[in-house]
Structure formats: structure tokens, C-alpha cells
Amino acid sequence: MSEPQILDSKWAKPAMSEVVEFYHTAIRKLVAEKFAASGKTWQEAVNDPAMELTRADFEKIEADLLATGYRFTMSADVSIKEEPEKYKPIAGVGNSGNQIMDEQGRMVVGTGDNVFQAKDVEGIARFIGTVDVVMEMLLGGVPEDTIAIIDDSGGTLTAPILEGFKAVVCMGGTTRSHLGILTREYGIPCIMAAELDGLGEGDRVFIEYSKPAGDAYAERDEAARVRISKIA
Amino acid sequence: MPTKLTYAQMQDMNQWLRESSDVFYFQCTTRTVQESKLFPVNPYIALSYYNCWYRYPELLRKISDAMSPEELGDRAREVSTSANAIMLGIIQQFYLGGRQYLLDMGLINATDGLEDVHFVLDFAQRVNRSYHRQSSYNLNSAMNHRSQILPERTLQVFEADALGCKPGDKLHQAVVKYLATASQYAFLKNCECRLGIHNSGPYKVGNHEMLVRDFVDLAEGDYPWMDGVASEIEYNNVTLPVIMKDTHFNIVDDWGSFEATPAYDHDNMVAVGLYTSDYLSNGYIPVHMNNASELADYLDHMRDQMQVATANLWKRISGWTRDQMIDAGLLVYYSVAKDLAHFAGVYSEEDWFTVEDRVQRLKPIMNDEYGGMAIAELVGYVSLSSQQGSPYTMSKFSNAPGDMWSAVPYSPLANDEFTAGVGPIRGGSTSLPRKTAKYTTTRGKLTADEANALARGFEPPIIEGPRRFYDDQWVKYHVGTPEADDLYRRAQESSIQLKGKGSGLNASDIEALRRW
């Protein structure tokens, strides 16, 4: 078969995500067009530098998607800093207004899976989501009583200041994520996969880290999740 | 012209491809999506796969021409370097990831690069089989997630020379703090990936279990971004054999991660040691192990150095452009086979820290969302069009009609069209500064040329000549012979407790001799 095989794949199906499907379909189409116009066999064409897609081809494919109004979801701080026009704005923590109260009458503003069983912690919620915030704390010190609210289950963003946190609430990952591994090694109380509702910067919170560690392999159990209660 | 591969060779290739596909699926889906607010992780992972596809065939042939895959595995097994279970087991995975993306984009067909695919997979399988010779498996997963790499002669030294500790004492506190700091430093210098951390074991020590914990590439060495910030880190690779009571390590997986029952608790640590080693060392070299106080002081000293290095490296990285972060991360992934080049004495920065032009061209589409979804679809959902199979089929773990890595069709044996390879390495570049510092080794700080020359002339005395083939099965029937005693004495050369004792020691002898 002297042509790109993917076009004839018997069990083909669209990719799951819109962006992958758009890109790969566009690339396949371009490959097929170039190949058809070349008059070469596939064997001749496949490693021929003159036949290869170029950086300009890939730039055009991305531009075509952006031209539809599509904007990407960011993951790294640097990406949105360098090309803000390509990315969706960052969404903050929402506030449904439907929070329940704990046994002490405090508003429960989130839950999460405990990395390891520790003591309950009370402290000040501070959002650590950008390089600038980390740099400020690296140079000026981590404020006392900081419970870091982090939307990144990795271990690198907060690497130089992690030891300064009283506790951590991570809005992603699982107890097996890098941040979970590191907080356990440091003995810093931590919950992962936290879902927050109504938590704000500077809120004083109580977190029940004394609950048993979460089981990364088990089905989600609401009753087993650690609660974050807002004190003030 | 038909392929020069035989039907049997192609079957071996597809068997290893499928085994690799299944174990990688298991590893990826029992983890979470890797992410970082600092690094664009998934875009760099995806790009690394392409770099492997285009460059591994030539670079692994270069290594193989200098040293056989079997000898590379044998050398790697005797020391702790980045040629360990995680990195060796992943060589073919990243390469096949590049193939799968290119298949899905229609840039190659399933019979393209046929002889390259066979070579790379065969090379990786042979290195892994040799590295895992002690257990006779090829991956930790094949041994039900157990990583028994080391022979008795090495483990006896680890057990006997370990220093006792208990919660609250100086050594225990130093070890706990060091492990935390080293883990964090490892994630940062490896751009968020866990390739700097490795564990093997468990090994039975009476009623206890030993986990051998390695941290690799810590000092000024292959990663150019470590120059300057890691100048005070004395050892590039460190190994801590940690002996635990009341703990069973039920999983030590293909990525060197462990899980224990009950959960790992530092309070159960009863003894520990500290060693360094590399491709130029004769096995493991003890580090400040004369007594517990000396070891604790040195661990604290290393920890202080790493904390400074972490802060300085973080400041450096936080000033990088996105392109620099992408290049660093993709080069960490792509360079998983780099230490094999060191063992073979053919290492070159240009080979292992260059992003090929055929990969550079793909950068415009590698925004955060595409990178994330492309990785999720490839290794998690197995939802790319090219990954799908007949609706009758059920894959090993997911039961879905598709597999992570598509097998190679056998049709080239019937004169179907194919291409042999991707051709020679082309030009490339990197947005990162090139290295200026020397390479930290157990023989001092060396230039790449000096390190290569030493490696080419080095045959570790422990496995010199016929000793290479004196495995534990041979020892079983030759204990006390001059050859066996000579083998063990070579492994005991730096041992505090066992120097010169030979091959006849059994478990009770070691228990009587050990320091804890």
C-alpha cells in the first residue's frame, strides 16, 4: 500500500479530545496532499527531507485552530505568561453558596484525600499558584501558619519553600502524586484531590488531618475524605 | 527486497512490544497525570518521544558497537547509576511512543523503520534481561512488581556494614531529613519527573526487609543546568540500603516506586548505609560509614548542600523561557539511555542533549492542552485512532479493543512495502546553554573525553574475566572454592565488617558480624 496507512485504517475512530482530533486530522490531510502531489512511492517519500512537514506547516495548523476561537487550557505558569492570547483565563475557586456546616457550626469549604494520618491543623489559607508567589516567599520567607493551597500535584513549583508550610491542600493529583510523596517524606500534613468551594485567600481554616490516609486504589468515599472548615 | 528479519525475529519483537505496551499501560494508569505549574510537563514528554524515535537507532547502535547489550546490563547491575530498572525499562517505551504518534499523524506507516524498531527493541530487551539476571526476569513487573537485582555478595556487605538507628536518634533523624531533601531535589533537577529516584528490593534480611534506595545524577554531570548550582555536591550517585522492621514491601514497580504493608513509616527503619558508585567504580564505595555519628553528620552536610542547590536551581529554572523548560524536560526523558554510553565509553553531550530538527518543527503545536491530551490519550485512554484494533479484541488490562503500542505487521515477510529506518541523525539544537563544568565521577571531576577514555579501559575487578558469569547459581555449588572466595573478596574489598571473609558466610554468620 503506497500511501499513508492511517487514512485506510479499518478500526479508525476520532480521538477523544477536540484538540488532538483537530491537529491529527489536519496533519494526516496535509501528509496525504503532499504525498499525492509528489508522484513518489511511500518508501521514497517517507524519509525524504523535501517531503517532510515543516515548522511552518505546524504553525499554520495551530493558527487554524485558534482562528476558530478555540483557546487552550494552561497547565504551566510560563505558558500563559508568554502567550496569554492562546490560553483561557485561569479560573479561581468558586463559591456555590450551598456549603454544609460541620459539627461545630463552621462552614465546610472543601474536602480531600489524606496523604498520611497526622494531627488536625489550624492555619491561614494562602494560594501558591505562580512562580512569582513562590519567589516572593523564597526571598522573604514563608509567612507563619501558612496552609498552602496548591493547584498542582507536582513537586517542583514549591520545591524551595515546601518545608516552610504548616500543611498543604492540593487541588489535583492523588495521594501517590509527587507532592503527596514529598509531603509524606517531610512529614507535612497534606490532602490531595481537594475540591474547594468558597475558600478564599487569607481565610483561617481547620483541617482534619487526623483522619486515616486515603486509599489511592479505592472507590471514592465521601465520609473518608478530610474536611476543610472555615473558621474566619 | 524483502526484509532481512526472520519470522521468529519479528515474533520476538512483537512479543516484547506487547509486553512493554501492557506494563506501560499498567504503570501509567495506576499513577496520576503528571503535572507542574513550573514545567510544561506533558508537552515535553510528548516531544521527548519523537526525539527517541529519530535518534535512538543510531545512538544505540553506536553504544552497541562499543559494548554488547549483555555486558552493559552486567555492568549496570553492579552499581547504581541512571542505567537502572526504571531507565532501562523505559528505553523502548519512549521510542515506541514516538512511533505511535507518528503513525497516528500519518507521518509513517506501520511497516516503516522496521529494522530500526527491531534493533532498538532487541537492544533494550537484551540490556534489561542482563540487568535483571539475578531474578531471571526482564522487568520488575514480570516478577510481580519485585526488584531483586543484586547478588548475595553485595547484599551481605550492605547488611553487615549497615549502622543501626532508632526513632529520635541522630542518625535516624539525619536519614529521614536527607531522604526528603534528596527526593525534592531529584524532582526539581529532573524537571518534575521521577527519573532521579530509584528503589530496588525488597531483599529479605531475617525478619526484616531491605530496600535499596538510589538517588542518581545529583552533581555536576550530564544535565547542563546543574553546572554551578551543583558544584558542591560531592557524589553524583548515592545509595542508601535501608533495613526496615515490621514492613513488607509488596510493590517495587517498574518505575522504582514502592508500596508497603503496613504503609512505609520511617519509625520502622532499624539500620542504614551510604554508598556511591558509577560506571567507573568497582561496585559500591562506602561513604562516611565508620560510625553512626559520622554518617549522620555527613548526611546533614549533604542535605545542607542540596537545600542550597535546590534554591539556586529553582531560581535558575524560574527564569527560563518556556522553550528552555521544554528542552530540559524532554532531554531528561530522552536521555534515559545516556549512562549506557558512559559505560561503553562513547558518551557525547551532543548525542544526548540535542533536540533534533525533526522534533523542533513540532513545537508549534505543543501547547499545554494538546500536550496534556496527547499524552492522556496515548498512555491512559488508549483512544488514538491508530491504537484501535478489531472490536473482537480485548487488551490485557482494560479489555478495550486497542493497545498502547501497535504491533508491527508481518507483511514485509510477504514482500509488502517497508522502510528499514529513519535514516541518520540530522542536525539539532537546544535552547539551553551547553555544559561548561566537568563531569563528577568516582575518579574525580573529568572532561567527557577523560571519562570516556577511562571507561573504555575499565573492566570492574568484581566481574573481570570469567567472574562475570559467576552468578549466585554458580556460587551455590562452589562455595569455599578459591574462585568463589576470590569473587566475594573482591566485593568485600571496601567492607568494614566483611573484608577478606570470602564466600562461606551464611545468614547467621552475617547476623553475628553485622553492626546493628
Image: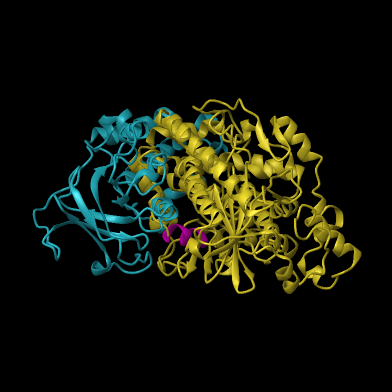
Rendered view: A108 above or below B350 = below
Segment tinted magenta in the rendering: B22-30
Rendered view: B286 above or below B475 = above
Instruction: Count the marks.
Output: 0
The structure residue drawn at horizontal position 20% and vertical position 42%, both measured from the top left corner, is A91
- Residue B130 x, y percent position in the rendering: 70, 58
- Residue B311 x, y percent position in the rendering: 45, 35
Q: Is residue B452 left or right of residue B388?
A: right
The structure residue drawn at horizontal position 62% and vertical position 27%, both measured from the top left corner, is B437
Is residue B194 among what the camera can see?
no
- Main secondary structure type of the part rendered in magenta: helix
- Tell me the yellow chain: B
Q: Is residue B271 left or right of residue B480?
A: left
Q: Does the magenta segment cover residue B220? A: no
- Tell me the cyan chain: A
- Residue A188 x, y percent position in the rendering: 37, 53
In terms of image quadrants, where is residue A217? bottom left
Q: Does the magenta segment cover residue B25? A: yes
- Residue B392 x, y percent position in the rendering: 42, 70
Q: Is B94 or B107 nearer to us in this picture?
A: B94
Q: Is B105 or B505 nearer to us in this picture?
A: B505
Rendered view: B131 above or below B436 = below
The structure residue drawn at horizontal position 32% and vertical position 39%, both measured from the top left corner, is A142
Q: Is A63 or B461 nearer to us in this picture?
A: B461
